[in-house]
Image (cartoon, rainbow, N blue to C red):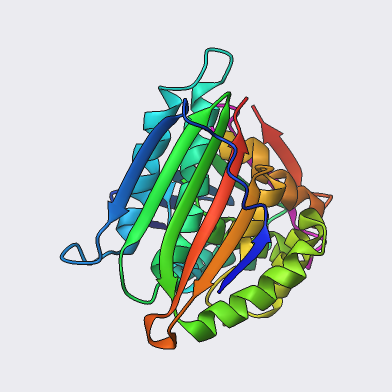
Amino acid sequence: MLEEFGNTAVSNGENATRFSLKLMAEPLELSWHHCGVTSDFIGDYFSRACARDVDPVDARHSISYMINEILENAVKFRHGGDIEIESSLENNSFEIQIRNRIAPQTAEGFREHLTGLLARDPGELLLERIEENALNPDASGSGLGILTLMNDYEAKLGWSFVSGRVSEGVELTTHAALRLS
Amino acid sequence: MEIGTNDYRVWTEGSTIHYEGTMRLSGTDAYAPILEIMNAVLAEKPELITLDLSGLEFLNSSGINLLAKFTIEIRKQPDVGVRVLGSKAIPWQSKSLKNLQRLHPALELTIS
């Protein structure tokens, strides 16, 4: 079964500059450290491929921030398995799909979270979430990754959940698009 | 006071807190020792606390949460002022630091 939230449309076509990468669960022992090096690498790669009217410093940083935040979530919540990254650039539009498996109960909580999130203004939600975090010092995650991407970076985000057999978990694809300027 | 790794360094000079490098720590717990240093400066109740971020190249969203949380702590103490120094050469600062001012309008933000 497929369920989609937010903006999952892919607009970059055949002529896009593309780059794909698979972070293998074994024998690398995927860890936090891989998020930063991977996102910096892809940010650097595409900042060199973008058009002359794009600020390469901003492109490198924005791509890196976006991938790092999504990968941090993938590493934190993944239910075993590899993490696949597909990225492309065309007409100053950078798009990425990051695919990983999550546990069915993680998927359920995340779908609920997204339904609430997509119904509201990200700027208002960001401030609300910060105030809530300040009142809950024991909360382990800040929940600010998605909100900063939407509000501060004006990224278009979408999520598709594909579920089959319960034992296999749910395949989550995070879609993100960024207009480079 | 100083804390750091190969990736970043945080240190204090009087009531100024300096940040340098790339901070991508894994969550609230991982940032706790840094928050401790920041809270120690606030505990002295100086007239003005300066957060000098002009050398902080990268900060993940958990780190942005740390700055926001500290801003709220300062907001609770009307006698303590706060100034944030950033750099135009570091893109995340122009994008995300304005959120601190929305949390605490008296916060003075200079990105130069």
* Image spot of residue A163 (x, y percent): 50, 76
* Image point (77%, 49%), residue name: B101
| Residue A136 found in image quarter | bottom right
The magenta-colored residue range is B76-90
Query: Is residue B77 in the magenta section?
Result: yes
* Image spot of residue A65 (x, y percent): 50, 45
* Image spot of residue A123 (x, y percent): 78, 54
* Image point (73%, 44%), residue name: B98
* Image point (42%, 22%), residue name: A49
Work out whether residue A155 or residue A55 is closer to the camera in this orientation and state it: A155
Work out whether residue B109 or residue B93 is closer to the camera in this orientation and state it: B93
Give the left or right position of residue A173, taking residue A122 as reference. Answer: left
On screen, A29 above or below A70?
below
Give the left or right position of residue B4, taking residue B109 as reference. Answer: left
On screen, B60 above or below A42?
below
Outermost residue, top side: A52
Whether residue A157 is visible: yes
Query: Is residue B67 in the magenta section?
Result: no
* Image point (52%, 32%), residue name: A13
Give the left or right position of residue B4, taking residue B99 as reference. Answer: left
Please state, as top left, top right, bottom left or bottom right, where the N terminus of chain B lies in the image: bottom left
* Image spot of residue A76 (x, y percent): 42, 70
Give the left or right position of residue A80, taking residue A177 as reference. Answer: left
Work out whether residue A163 or residue A68 is closer to the camera in this orientation and state it: A163
| Residue A141 found in image quarter | bottom right
